[in-house]
Amino acid sequence: MSESQHVPSAVALSVNAVSKSYGALKALDTLSLTVPRGEFVALLGPNGAGKSTLFQLLTGLFVPDSGEIEVAGHDMRHDARAALAKLGVVFQQPTLDLDLSVVANLRFHARLHGMGGVAKKRIAEELDRIGQAERAKDPARALSGGNRRKIELARALLHEPALLLMDEPTVGLDPGSRELLVDYVHQLCRERGMGVLWATHLVDEAERAHRVIVLHKGQRIAVDTPRALCEQTDTATLGEAFLVLTGETPPEKEETV
Ligand SMILES: Nc1ncnc2c1ncn2[C@@H]1O[C@H](COP(=O)(O)OP(=O)(O)OP(=O)(O)O)[C@@H](O)[C@H]1O
């Protein structure tokens, strides 16, 4: 049985007043955010906003200087094993072993998660779902960039996480593959009731998010639906809203003042 004995939490991720500094630089400053199950939340921030730092804390690579992180109700500091078991991650940098076959990459992950006998079935299901079943025995190296990303996503989903973290996952993909990946993750979110936190600096990837969190210089400067962010900033597009919120007023607005 793969079901957890923990009572499922309706909140996939809770970040409460988390701070992290590198020397004098405060990369994250008392950041709080929530990702409910079934919601696609975009974490939108320019380079240097603190997205990667947050993901390092969420994946347990580092611990925050202060504040708490819970994944599906499990505290990352005191119950990291249970928290990490509920987490699926696709990193910005490719992490497949290119010399191994697709299925061997997935088996390795299944073993890390102690999946046992259910692994074979879950691997087959996820590969089938993304139309890559016939590529199972191919070396990962033989796949296109877009298909490698799909395999990384299938791998992240094997252990049926409550929270899916996507860290700038479209880096290096062509526009078509980018759009397909965003669509697929929206579909997963709906169908599996997973919470998704999608970090990006690309506004178009955040346009269909249930909520957008704007991160700037380590602080959450806005959180709302894309439409509400436009209303608040009196702008027509999320791109313009983002520029206004981060203090870079679009040229056409400046001219009309
Ligand atoms: N190991 C480190 N040592 C010192 N400063 C760091 C370190 N890692 C990140 N920083 C700084 O912390 C701030 C936040 O960086 P971070 O990489 O988290 O932002 P980001 O939003 O992910 O940006 P990018 O998309 O460029 O990676 C930046 O000013 C960065 O220079």
Image (tube, rainbow, N blue to C red):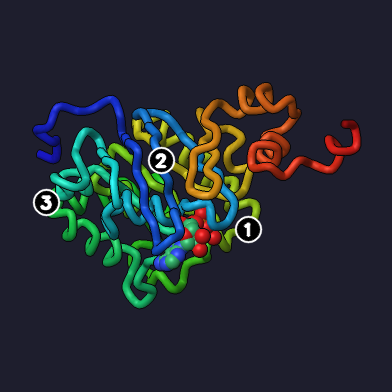
Eye-nearest disc, 3 or 2: 2
78 to the left or right of 247: left
Residue reaching furthest bottom? 99
Residues at marks 3 and 1 touching, judged by CB atoms closer than 8 Å: no
Question: On screen, 105 above or below 49?
Answer: below
What residue is at 34 percent from the left and 29 percent from the top? 37
From mark 3 to mark 1, how far is it between C-alphas? 37 Å
What residue is at 35 percent from the left and 72 percent from the top? 97
Quarter of the image where one finds residue 63: bottom left
Q: Which residue is mark 1?
A: 174
| Residue 120 drawn at (x, y percent) | 20, 53
From mark 3 to mark 2, how far is it between C-alphas? 40 Å
Can residue 149 be seen by looking at this rendering? no
**Quick one: quadrant of the C terminus?**
top right
Q: Amino acid at mark 2?
A: Leu
Question: Foreground residue, 201 or 257?
Answer: 257
| Residue 140 drawn at (x, y percent) | 40, 69
Q: Amino acid at mark 3?
A: Gly
Q: Earlier in the sequence, mark 3 or mark 1?
A: 3
Q: Which residue is mark 2?
A: 31
Label 1: how many residues lie within 10 Å, few (<14), some (14-19) or many (20+)?
few
What residue is at 36 percent from the left and 53 percent from the top? 20
Check residue 117 in the rendering and tell me which mark sits there, or answer none.
3
**Quick one: quadrant of the N terminus?**
top left
- The yes-or-no answer for disc 3 within 8 Å of ligand 1 is no
Eye-nearest disc, 3 or 1: 1
Check residue 90 in the rendering and tell me which mark sits there, or answer none.
none
Q: Amino acid at mark 1?
A: Asp
Q: Secondary structure at mark 1?
A: loop
